[in-house]
Amino acid sequence: MKSYILIFPILASFLVTLFFVPPWIRRAKNAGLVGKDVNKFKGEKIAEAGGVTVISGFVLGVLTYVAISTFILKRTDNFVEIFALMSSILFISFIAFTDDILGWRIGLRRRTRLVLVAFASIPLIAINAGKSVVSVPFFGAVDLGIVYPLVLIPLGVVGATTTLNFLAGFNGLEAGEGIILISAFAMVSYFTGNTWLSIIALCMIASLFAFLIYNLNPAQVLGGDSLTYLVGGLVATMAILGNFEKVAVFFFIPVIIEVVLKSRGKLLKQSFGKPKKDGSLDLKYDKIYSLNHLAILLMKKYGTKPTEKKAVFLIWAFQIIIIILGFLIFKEGIFS
């Protein structure tokens, strides 16, 4: 019966984020922390770095879960892993917020961000998170030993954290993508026996839903790196702590495709569309450098008026299809 009390951490995450977003919008505008909504013809200025509100809701939700586990449920299982996860996430969030404050056109140097995010994996390395035995094609199970925590954990954290923000640029896209991805990881965690990890995931989902209310088109606030780095960091830490890295990589296929498309433009081409007076979007470039561009192209090809909202829904649908395929392909490992 006591297990029903675990709804409170999730509710706390939602309400805290919901409470903090409106004052953040006002304060960000007063401080000049605003950006142009580039997919709108008039290009209104809206508040940026709203991911900090999601961080607040998520952290307070997880701490509520820890408090309930300690004082009511009388259990302290996985507390070491939880605090390692939180340490990594908070370090990643600090890096991202710093980058947001400096502005996306200036920001931290790419190399600096990679190095700093690699340092964010130290808490996971310190507790020797995950399992060093991995399945390698043609070789079977291979124990990587010390190579796993010292090499693969930092690579995983850096890779997931710094690439998720490639698939961005449309109102609501990043928050919705985060909800879909983390929901999938919550289910994988639950079915693989990591219930504690699924509850942490639900705290993030609740925070993202509260933020999405203000981030959907037409957005009142943008998430920035504070949002995408946070979600990417949680994706990496959940995959490592839950030992489902292969599943995580498969679920990440849309982001991997986005990285490949961005690489065509040497990571310089932007994901935005070209706004028109009637509220529709046109292609910004002659070639496709983003899934955002591909969504616009598909709508044009099949006679649908390309809009920002429809493009976002298309990308979300693609992500959901990939996740369903992932559950089918890895069902033995997930549901065994």
Image (cartoon, rainbow, N blue to C red):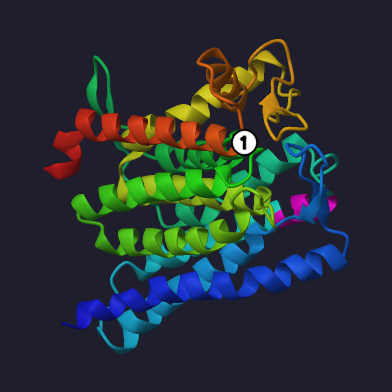
What residue appears at the point 78 percent right and 69 percent down from the top-left corner? 26
Amino acid type indicated by mark 1: Glu
Furthest-bottom residue in this view: 71
Say which of 315 and 71 sits in front: 315
Relative to residue 298, is residue 317 depicted above or below?
A: below
Relative to residue 143, is residue 222 depicted above or below?
A: below
What residue appears at the point 54 percent right and 34 percent down from the top-left corner? 310
Q: Which residue is mark 1?
A: 308
Q: What type of secondary structure mainly makes up the magenta span?
A: helix
Q: Is residue 134 visible?
A: no
Residue 152's x, y, as percent?
Answer: 46, 36
For the residue labelled by badge 1, is the local secondary structure a helix, a strand or a loop?
helix
Relative to residue 207, is residue 180 depicted above or below?
A: above
Q: Which residues are magenta?
A: 97-102
What residue appears at the point 78 percent right and 32 percent down from the top-left corner? 277
Q: Quadrant of residue 30?
A: bottom right
Does the magenta run of residues contain 96? no
* Residue 262 located left or right of residue 232: right
Pointer 1: residues within 10 angstroms few (<14), some, or many (20+)? many
Q: Is residue 36 visible?
A: yes
Furthest-left residue in this view: 336
Say which of 100 and 132 sits in front: 100
Residue 78's x, y, as percent?
Answer: 32, 66
Residue 52's x, y, as percent?
Answer: 65, 63
* Residue 184 located left or right of residue 140: right
Relative to residue 220, is residue 154 depicted above or below?
A: above
Q: Quadrant of residue 330?
A: top left
Furthest-front residue in this view: 278
